[in-house]
């Protein structure tokens, strides 16, 4: 692990369960204005994350998760990713993710404007599902084979 | 005294009931263990969100009504019950707690309910439902929690309700579920103040967090998620409680049925004995009559 320094722990947590928990060298998460890398002894931090990836470097290899939006919290050498969905790149079902995009897009087309406010919310929600589906496909293609 | 044949039939039917309740108990036991494990697995997420909520609430400068509240004219209360019965007082105690809470409020009330049993109860009492959900009480997923949570947050944001409460059964152990009341919105300012008092400057205070983008914006994202997560936790607790309550109720039912079979068997034996005695005395009397003649 980090030479002589303190070690960093990382947890990837969803509402249902803890997806990853262990000692790591470095964590890179997608946050509001780009990406942030965290090494041991990082200053305490709370950030919102966007749909994207969380990449964990451990023993010269990268573990990649496709993640939905959520939060990233670092304190006392514990980096915690709190997202609704986190799927390891190698376990993504590309067909299923593709179906999710299609289904959401169909819903988007069928969406009718009843009241302005409700419409905007519904639309934002469905667009979020499209982005997450696309993210899954993208991550699977880019990192899935490694 | 009931006839021998009646007793036999009764014993058979009680035995059949015992078989059914015993099977239900076994099924509920398995489901309970699964549900209990889910509650435990889901805890780290909820605990982290709560901790973040506290850290941010203390630092955010905005006086968002979500945090500090506003004058309360309407109170929304969401009650979580089960879809099915056969689980002892599980549903009754959640609705009883709700009725008690409603009677204490001077503000207008909006009732939200999840679970068919709760829906049926409020319909019967002719209490209007602002929103109702059903079909997932024994195995809730996050999607449902999100749906309910979003709606509750929306009620508050659109000022249809000025405070949002949640009532559900917290499971203590398989035999005990306790109905609890928690306020979801506004996010307990009392607690935030307590927190601030405890945080003596420079002594034992945790390192201040850096916020990206900033505390207020994170708060906007965090509040709806926090409500969803609290609803999800409550749904999971309630599901575990439901299975636990059903397991206990079915165990009691099975025990009672078995006891009843024992009683009835005793009665049946007595009846049979009485019948034999009667037959013998009839035969004896007949023989007596013959020899006398």
Image: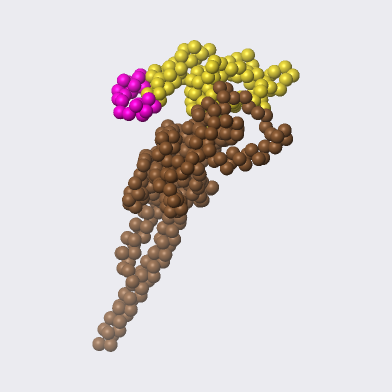
Q: Nearer the viewer, residue B106 or A64?
A: B106
Q: Nearer the viewer, residue B103 or A91?
A: B103
| Residue B137 percent coordinates (x, y) | 41, 41
How many discs mark residues in the rendered view?
0
Residue B8 can be seen in this image: yes
Up-down relation of residue A40 to residue B126 (above or below):
above
| Residue B160 percent coordinates (x, y) | 40, 39
Up-down relation of residue B191 to residue B98 (above or below):
above
Q: Residue furthest bottom?
A: B292
Residue at the image point whose x is 59% and y is 24% from the top = B211
Q: Which region of the structure is painted magenta?
A: A102-121
Name the magenta segment's main secondary structure: helix
Q: Quadrant of the N terminus of chain B?
A: bottom left
Up-down relation of residue B115 to residue B275 (above or below):
above
Residue at the image point whose x is 63% and y is 27% from the top = B209
Residue at the image point whose x is 57% and y is 22% from the top = B212
Left or right: B159 in relation to A1: left
Left or right: A106 in relation to B45: left
Structure colour scheme? by chain
Q: Colour of chain A?
A: yellow
Residue at the image point whose x is 39% and y is 45% from the top = B111
| Residue A139 percent coordinates (x, y) | 48, 15
Left or right: B156 in relation to B122: right
Up-down relation of residue B170 to residue B288 (above or below):
above
Q: Colour of chain B?
A: brown
**Magenta residue check for B141:** no
| Residue B263 percent coordinates (x, y) | 42, 64
């Amino acid at each position: 692990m980090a030479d002589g320094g303190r070690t960093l722990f990382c947890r990837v947590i969803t509402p249902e369960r803890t997806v990853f928990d262990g000692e790591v060298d470095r964590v890179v998460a997608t946050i509001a204005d780009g990406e942030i890398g965290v090494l041991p002894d990082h200053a305490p931090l709370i950030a919102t994350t966007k749909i994207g990836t969380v990449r964990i470097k451990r023993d010269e290899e990268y573990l990649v998760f496709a993640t939905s939006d959520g939060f990233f919290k670092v304190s006392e050498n514990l980096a915690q990713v709190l997202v609704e969905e986190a799927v390891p790149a190698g376990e993504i079902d590309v067909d299923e993710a593709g179906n999710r995009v299609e289904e959401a897009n169909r819903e988007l087309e069928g969406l009718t404007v009843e009241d302005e406010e409700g419409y905007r919310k519904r639309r934002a929600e469905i667009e979020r599902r499209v982005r997450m589906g696309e993210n899954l496909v993208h991550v699977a293609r880019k990192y899935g084979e490694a | 005294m009931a006839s021998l044949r009646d007793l036999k039939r009764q014993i058979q039917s009680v035995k059949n009931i015992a078989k059914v309740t015993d099977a239900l108990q076994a099924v509920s036991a398995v489901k309970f263990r699964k549900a209990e494990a889910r509650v435990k697995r889901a805890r780290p997420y909820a605990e982290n969100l709560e901790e973040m909520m506290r850290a941010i609430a203390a630092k955010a400068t905005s006086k968002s009504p979500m945090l500090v509240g506003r004058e309360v004219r309407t109170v929304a209360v969401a009650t979580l019950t089960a879809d099915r019965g056969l689980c002892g007082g599980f549903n009754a105690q959640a609705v009883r707690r709700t009725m008690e809470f409603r009677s204490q409020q001077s503000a207008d009330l909006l009732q939200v309910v999840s679970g068919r049993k709760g829906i049926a109860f409020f319909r019967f009492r002719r209490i209007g439902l602002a929103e109702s959900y059903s079909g997932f009480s024994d195995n809730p997923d996050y999607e449902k929690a999100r749906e309910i949570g979003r709606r509750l947050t929306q009620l508050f944001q659109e000022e249809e309700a000025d405070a949002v409460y949640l009532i559900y059964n917290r499971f203590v152990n398989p035999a005990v579920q306790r109905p609890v009341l928690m306020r979801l919105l506004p996010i307990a300012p009392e607690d935030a103040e307590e927190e601030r008092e405890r945080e003596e400057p420079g002594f034992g205070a945790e390192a201040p967090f850096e916020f990206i983008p900033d505390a207020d914006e994170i708060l906007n994202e965090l509040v709806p998620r926090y409500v969803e997560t609290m609803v999800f936790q409550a749904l999971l607790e309630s599901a575990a409680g439901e299975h636990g309550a059903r397991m206990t109720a079915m165990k009691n039912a099975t025990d009672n049925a078995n006891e009843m079979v024992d009683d009835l068997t005793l009665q049946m034996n007595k009846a049979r004995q009485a019948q034999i005695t009667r037959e013998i005395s009839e035969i004896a009397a007949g023989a007596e009559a013959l020899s006398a003649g």
